[in-house]
Image (cartoon, helix red, strand yellow):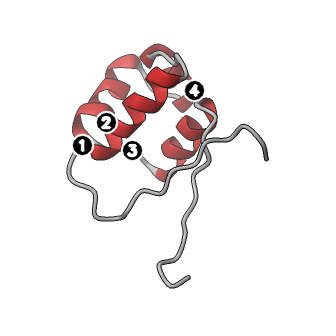
Amino acid sequence: VTGVQTCALPIYLSKNSISAYIRKMMQQEDVTIKEAATYTGVSVGTFRNKLSQDRFSIGDLMILAEMCDYKLAFVPNHT
């Protein structure tokens, strides 16, 4: 697939780093909080809470990655 950004995130990320990364992805692709909330099926307030509490499901991450033209992947350590 061409034009898809990838990034490998280690599993030991500190608190709020997933949310910080999501914010960065959204900012790069001009995705608003309202748009992200709509696509993930929650209210704007709930989405903001997810960002502040760093509480995203794998489904949320898949949707957000697709919205921002990223690919979500699980890669084993033993390659």
Q: Quadrant of residue 66?
A: top right
Q: Nearer the viewer, mark 2 or mark 3?
A: 2
Q: Nearer the viewer, mark 1 or mark 4?
A: 1
Q: Which mark is residue 16?
A: 1
Tag 2 residue: 20
Marks 2 and 1: in contact by CB < 8 Å?
Answer: yes
Q: Is residue 26 left or right of residue 17?
A: right
Tag 3 residue: 56
Marks 4 and 2: in contact by CB < 8 Å?
Answer: no
Which one is earlier in the sequence, the residue at label 1 or at label 4? Answer: 1
Near mark 1 (Cα within 10 A), the count class, few <14, some 14-19 or many ≥20, is some
Q: From the top left corner, tell me how far across and down residue 12 is, in percent.
A: 28, 64
Q: Looking at numbered disc 3 in the image, what kind of residue is underneath it? A: Phe
Q: Looking at numbered disc 2 in the image, what kind of residue is underneath it? A: Ala
Which one is earlier in the sequence, the residue at label 2 or at label 4? Answer: 2
Give whichever of 2, 18 is nearer the camera. 2
Q: From the top left corner, tell me how far across and down residue 1 is, in percent.
A: 79, 47
Near mark 4 (Cα within 10 A), the count class, few <14, some 14-19 or many ≥20, is some
Q: Looking at numbered disc 4 in the image, what kind of residue is underneath it? A: Tyr
Near mark 2 (Cα within 10 A), the count class, few <14, some 14-19 or many ≥20, is some
- Which SS class for mark 4? helix
Which one is earlier in the sequence, the residue at label 4 or at label 3? Answer: 4
Q: Looking at numbered disc 1 in the image, what kind of residue is underneath it? A: Asn
Give whichever of 6, 56 is nearer the camera. 6
**Residue located at (41% from left, 35% from top):** 22
Q: Which mark is residue 39?
A: 4
Q: From the top left corner, tell me how far across and down residue 76 is, in percent.
A: 52, 76
